[in-house]
Amino acid sequence: MKNVGEAPQEELATGERSTRNRVARSILDHGPSTVAELAGRLGLTQAAVRRHLDALVADDVVEAREQRVYGARTRGRPAKVFALTACGRDAFDQSYDKLAADALRWIAEQQGGEQAIAAFARARIAAQSGAYRKAVESVPADKRAEALAKALTEDGYAATARSAPHPQQGEQLCQHHCPVAHVAEQFPQLCEAETEFFAELLGTHVQRLATIAHGDGVCTTFIPKTSHAPDTARATENTAHASASTAGRNPA
């Protein structure tokens, strides 16, 4: 199961994500549920359930509805129930992941192995690049990582940008969710193409420090601080092998 209702804040603890997933899973298994029903099934307080539901509603994973009443309606307001949205159901559906992995495996077998997968990965990124370019090119150089994070978040990656920890000079782009993580586990070329694209887009070499596909909690990309934006073509050339070599795995 994918992590659902996952907030972009890096401070969200693993235990919080796990409980939030349990709340969503309980609704999937039992259908639209009240706060009291969820609390009883999961052994949580109603206050805790409401807190997780608020986050899931904000992420469009669940929605509140009026409880459907069969037979004579009793006095008082109907209880509010929470049901999964279409987006929430998609988060539990792994069939598309299997289909994508099967398709890529067929491409590798029929069209030229790993090079064919890499070509597909680059073409996929290129097809999606328009919105990212628009977002990044519309802001000053020192705001580009933040603009890229915002654009990635709009595509479901729950991304943030922050200053890198000392003694590193630069920023860290963190993607707290990866819609293709299950497929990228088998085909790291997807991560490598993304890393190359980040370097070309930001006009500097970047280094992938960790990936969800490799088992890390967050996809983390280091973007070094530069005094000026270097030539894009030169940055891309310098990054092609150095950055991509660590794109699908944690080098630590």
Image (spheres, rainbow, N blue to C red):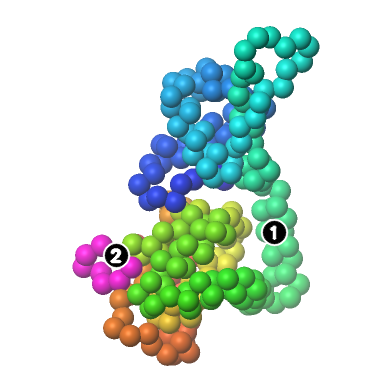
Q: Is residue 226 above or below residue 83?
A: below
Q: Is residue 62 above or below residue 170?
A: above
Query: Please, what secondary structure does the residue beneath circle 1 have?
Result: helix
Q: Is residue 178 above or below residue 133?
A: above
Query: Please, what secondary structure does the residue beneath circle 2 have?
Result: loop
- Which amino acid lies under the numbered mark 2 shown in the image of this protein? Ala
Q: Which residue is mark 1?
A: 100
The rendered magenta stretch, by its main secondary structure, is classed as: loop
Residue closest to the eye, 43 or 247: 43
Res 47 quadrant in image: top left
Residue closest to the eye, 117 or 231: 231
The answer to if 169 sits in the magenta stretch is yes
Residue plotted at (43% across, 55% down):
218
Residue plotted at (50% across, 35% down):
54
Q: CA distance from mark 1 to mark 2?
A: 34 Å
Residue plotted at (48% across, 89% down):
233
On screen, residue 2 versus residue 113, left or right, reads left
Residue closest to the eye, 107 or 41: 41
- Which amino acid lies under the numbered mark 1 shown in the image of this protein? Ala
Which range is magenta? 165-171
Residue closest to the eye, 191 or 90: 90
The answer to if 48 sits in the magenta stretch is no
Extreme-right residue of the structure:
71
Q: Is residue 104 above or below residue 134?
A: above
Check disc 2: other Cα within 10 Å, few if <14, some if 14-19, many if 20+: some
Q: Is residue 249 visible?
A: no
Q: Position of residue 31 (x, y in %)?
A: 67, 27
Residue plotted at (41% across, 59% down):
160
Q: Which residue is mark 2?
A: 164
Q: Position of residue 77 (x, y in %)?
A: 62, 17
Q: Is residue 177 visible?
A: yes
